[in-house]
Image: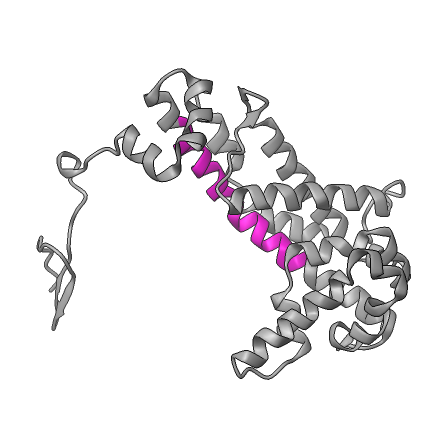
Amino acid sequence: MITFHKERGFTKYYGTKIIITFVSSKKNQKKMKYHTLEKYASVQRMNRFFIATGSKTGAMKLYRVNLLVSQAFYPILNLTEIFLRNSLYASIENYFSNSDWIIIEKTGFMNDLSLSRSGYYLKNCVINAENKMLRKGIDVSAGKVLAEQSFGFWVSLFEPAHYRLIGGSVIHSFPHKPSHINRRAIFSILCKIRDFRNRIYHNEPICFIGTSVDFSYAVQIKNDLLEMLGWMEPDIKKYVQRFDTIDNKTSNYTM
């Protein structure tokens, strides 16, 4: 027997009886007031939404929709990052014939003198990951170092200096790309995805082009991202598309 009972504060289990806290009655729900949201989200952040919509109600609605669209990007961005990094790692592994290249190459291509102007970015990323593990008493392994790297680490492999030092091997992660798509084109797409990803993860608006409310750039990023996945493997593009609710979220917005 399962019974449901309103009890303030917490949920308890008593044998077969389940006591569940309910806090969802509409009459008990209080709407966030604009000045409260403005206080904690910041005046500067909310002003852009207010100017675009012309009212506090409109600003709060647009702010909410922006969050929902950003939320819809999370599974797509997360899956893309995982699939991309693993594919790039495998391509470089094949090039060096070494599954531990991310550790070994700290004193190899990552230490090449031509990278001094960039401050040896890749090498420092790996060293920082290793040091972080050592501080926590975790054994350092290639798989763990790989998992610690940011999206920017993988994007930077398409920068000319890095790309040359790894023999352009990362282009082989895109066996289904059109013939005209080269390093520069992929690097450009990845940079846009990286910058857009950072906006979402830092709660920056993705609903504006200039001062106009316009989700078209967000939709374009999504389309570019899916197209790129198709260049890697058509099946993973189809898989990621299962989680795509972005167009539905954007099309529901009206001023």
Q: Up-down: is 136 above or below 55? A: below
The one nearer the camera, 80 or 149, is: 149
Residue 57: image quadrant is top left
Q: Work out which quarter of the rendered image holds the C terminus and state it.
A: top left
Q: Is residue 73 magenta?
A: yes
Q: Main secondary structure of the magenta part?
A: helix
Visible residue check, residue 172: no
- Bounds of the magenta span? 62-84
Residue at far top of view: 54
Residue beneath the point at 49% across and 29% down:
250
Q: Position of residue 219 (x, y in %)?
A: 60, 33
Q: Is residue 27 left or right of residue 83?
A: left
Q: Up-down: is 106 above or below 77? A: below
Residue 182: image quadrant is top right
Q: Position of residue 77 (x, y in %)?
A: 58, 49
Residue beneath the point at 80% across and 71% down:
93
Visible residue check, residue 185: yes
Q: Is residue 201 magenta?
A: no
Residue 124: image quadrant is bottom right
